[in-house]
Amino acid sequence: MLPFFPMSEERRKAMKKADKILVLILLLIALAFALFFFLRAEEGGFARVTVDGEVKAELPLSKDILYRVETETGYNVIQIQDGYASIQEADCRDQICVEHKKIHLTGETIVCLPHKLVVEIVGAETTQYDTVVG
Amino acid sequence: MQRKNVAYYGLFASLAILMGYVEMLIPIPLLVPGMKLGLANVIIVIVLYLMDAKAAFFISLVRVLLSGLLFAGFAGLLYSLAGALFSFCIMVLLKKTDQFSMIGVSIAGGVFHNIGQIIVAALVVENIRLMYYLPFLLFFGVVTGIIIGFVAKTALKYLNRPL
């Protein structure tokens, strides 16, 4: 027996008016944020690597490379390939960063919380740091 | 505190911890970091309606601390704690207004759990760009919140009889 499907009359009434308004507002906020991010997204020029808020490197997406970052809590190996950035390997315990899909649009990020490491795609013009390549 | 309450506190706290464990065993595709089903919130919502806000607060606190110790380790504790407190406050507020059903309360709880976690995460890595994940987390928070709310509502119907 599936207790939640299909929607019975009782279940449809289970949500009050205020519930529905809440759902609507939350979805609209999500949509607004999504549009804000995705409409501005374009092919990025660099992958900016920051550890604990400090920029460690800006890797051009046009050049395939494996870049190893040592942090206080461990290491991450960042891979640039075919214009995409991903984390190939890391010794963090949750491996969320390694499983994250590869990124290439401006604003997209990969985060490794245990190492306080963020890989963020930035546009070609906005770069203000020297490119650090191994 | 009445003896009956002591038993209920213990029972619900262990149920909430168990739910957190069950959730870890379910392999959900991790589309976004921080995305969770929030099964433990079923118990917190039930406690909020069956007992009171005080009970829900302490059970939520005990759950986060013990789950952190047992499964996640202390590093993840900060995120869980922020999420749980954020979620608890908003659920109590919405329940007080008396305008929302359990489902609305549960949706708000789920969504704000995610928001609390992402704020702490953004502070930890000192990168506001983490907000990139916010629309995904809002959307999934609404979906899981509806499911959790239905489960809690259905469970409460049975629980109300013997109590």
Image (cartoon, coloured by chain):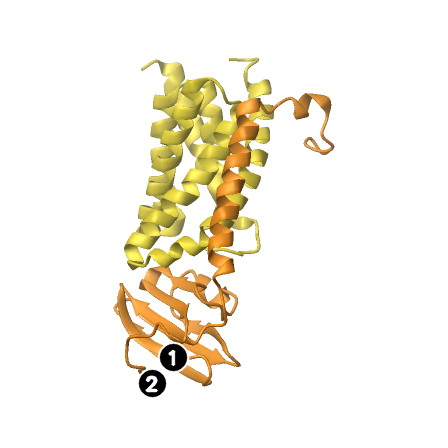
Chain colours: A orange, B yellow
Give the class, few, some or many, for how many residues have Cα within 10 Å of label 2's Cα (few <14, many ≥20).
few
Residue type of the residue flagged with mark 1:
Leu
Q: Are marks 1 and 2 in contact (CB under 8 Å)?
A: yes
Say which residue appears at 72% left-offset and 22% top-offset.
A9
Amino acid of disc 2: Val
- Picture residue at 34% right of the left edge, 34% below the top: B61
Residue picked out by circle 1: A59
Q: Is residue B57 left or right of residue A41?
A: left
Disc 1 or 2, which lies upstream in sequence? Answer: 1
Residue under pointer 2 = A133
B156 up-or-down from A32: above or below: above
Mark 1 to mark 2 CA distance (whole Å): 7 Å
Q: In the rendered structure, the residue with mark 1 lies on which chain?
A: A
Q: Please name the residue shown 38% across and 51% down the image.
A: B72
* Quadrant assignment, res A60: bottom left
- Looking at the rendered structure, the secondary structure element under dot 2 is loop
